[in-house]
Amino acid sequence: MTDLIADPASPPAAPAPARASVGEARLAGAVAAAMALGVGELVTGLGASSQSLIGSVGNGFIRQSGGDLARTAISLFQTADKPALIIGIVVICLLIGAALGVASRRRPWIGAVGFATFGLIGVWAAASDPLASVGRATIGAAVAVAAGLGTLTLLLRLAASTHSAAAARPERPVNPERPSVRDTPTTPHASRRAFFGWTAAAGAFAVTAAVAGRAAVQGTSNAARAAIRLPVPTKRAVPVGAPASMTGPGVASFDVDGLSPYLVPNHDFYRIDTALVVPNVNPDTWSLKVSGMVSNPFEITFDELMSLPQIEEAVTLSCVSNEVGGKLVGNALWQGVPLGTLLQHAGVQPDASQVVGRSVDGFTAGFPTAALTADRTAIVAVGMNGEPLPVLHGFPARLVVAGLYGYVSATKWLSEIHLTTLDAFDGYWIPRGWSKLAPIKTESRIDVPRSGAPLQAGTIPIAGVAWAPGPGRGITRVEVQVDDGPWKEATLGAVLSDSTWRQWMLAWEATAGTHTLRVRATDGTGETQTGDEAPPEPDGATGWDSRRVTVT
Ligand SMILES: Nc1nc2c(c(=O)[nH]1)N[C@H]1C(S)=C(S)[C@@H](COP(=O)(O)O)O[C@H]1N2
Ligand SMILES: [Mo]
């Protein structure tokens, strides 16, 4: 029986090691994940890599879900959706971090494996992201993993020391007359404070690192952009003595409140692209290749491109996913080198039938060489409305081809112009269900009266824009119908070329009641816009824009 009695000389069973509570471990893990993300942004940003790890992961994510995105509109990744996706990725990372923190309380190796996996996913995503450099991503991921794991280990230890201090408390001598003695760093109160203090500091550092990393990247292209002076074009889009509505962005031909200006200011211009993180291109290291089925493939620097004669033209750009009455269309002055100049220099082989623009981010858009007739404006643009291209609109250079939807022609952040055949290559959106040939359809839109606006009987302007950009097209007639009345011809604004939209206006003698307004346009070939309704997919929406208004 004696052997059942503990030998008083043997050491007592070791007490369970003090651990962070589940809540503390969760917090520590989330902050450690934030630290990894923030440091990753900082390292990739200081490396002046134009892609961040988070951006690469997001792009990889989009690629992986490509099948599902096939059925969604090109407008899916409009400006508003991008922050949502980035925030989603960050939140998921923080949640996984929190779970890793909890698991690491007992098994620290789980945290190590988890963070290393994070890093590998970042490198894997970068490897298939044309914007990212795998070398920089690897360094960034390694430093990020180290920072994340280090943060997790330190915070878990700090939290654990809280509890060991708590456990130790009853044994510690307490001097009731001098309670402040307990306020040493090993007391539970102080070490809890230390834990939360360090947690907050780590979180703040992580956010600062991320912001600084992105700012470093954007600073490079913003500074380069600010230093650019556009050369005087050999041909200006705005003739001397042109009406005020054409000489600058933001002005309309008709004095109607709410009517779209003839030239849309850059900051109001619609933006569509697949880029989760906008490519920040440094023009000093950027170059443009002309390659493929050409007799003289070549590559030019930004300075060389800028030294070639430039033209300026007004061209209306439209997105194929624009719904009838939608806002994914705009008109601007584009300045740059005619695409023909570069193609002539390259010597396009007679068998080539497709021009493919490739972006630094891997996006591609292709259209038939046959579209490049002498009367079609096609520019490698470096300027928009008199300024260097905004970063969002393709800095330092993009393609603008009059009359073709953006997804087949208007490659932003252009890096290569590749000549091939129509059969040999499909641009980005083609396998995703969109038409290979995509001329912009004749469309018209009512801007005013706005729906829901209070209207009073009397003369009310109905006004908007209509477009059928392209050689031999342009808008020649716009008609408005009120209820089931006759189609009435609207007055047309002036245009700079057949490549732009046209403002229109009709003074309506409105009577009290609810009315339906409709608009339709006719292009330069005499063809009137169809009233048959079709969705944007696969080659552009059709139908008449209409609006119900109530007049009192
Ligand atoms: N690199 C790149 N260029 C791109 C795209 C893109 O996703 N990536 N989208 C195209 C589409 S679908 C349209 S409608 C136009 C829009 O140009 P904007 O954003 O300047 O209006 O850009 C085109 N160029
Ligand atoms: Mo588009």
Image (cartoon, rainbow, N blue to C red):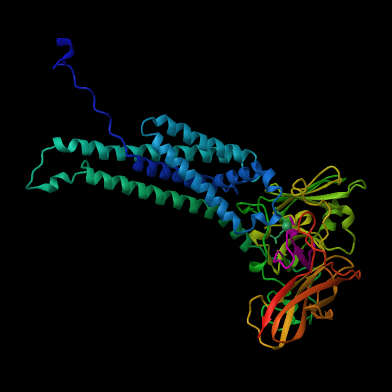
Q: Residue at x 22, y 39 (%)?
A: 166
Report the quarter where the C terminus lies. Answer: bottom right
Give 244 or 316, whichever is nearer the viewer: 316
Give 398 or 257, whichever is nearer the viewer: 257
Q: Residue at x 46, y 44 (%)?
A: 95
Give 542 or 379, whichever is nearer the viewer: 542
Say left or right for 104 vs 415. Answer: left
Extreme-bottom residue of the structure:
458
Q: Residue at x 70, y 71 (%)?
A: 264
Say left or right for 334 vs 164. Answer: right
Say left or right for 282 vs 207. Answer: right
Q: Quadrant of ligand 2?
A: bottom right
- Look at the picture and state if 99 lies above or below 476: above
Q: Is residue 259 visible?
A: no
Q: Is residue 82 visible?
A: yes
Magenta-colored stretch includes residue 318: yes
- Look at the picture and state if 137 lies above or below 403: above
Q: Quadrant of residue 162?
A: top left
Q: Position of residue 143 (x, y in %)?
A: 48, 39
Q: Position of residue 299 (x, y in %)?
A: 77, 48
Magenta-colored stretch includes residue 430: no
Extreme-left residue of the structure:
177
Q: Residue at x 50, y 37 (%)?
A: 142
What span is colored magenta in the figure?
304-328
Q: Quadrant of residue 66?
A: top right
Report the quarter where the N terminus lies. Answer: top left
Q: Quadrant of residue 237?
A: bottom right
Q: Position of residue 430 (x, y in %)?
A: 78, 48
- Look at the picture and state if 18 lies above or below 438: above
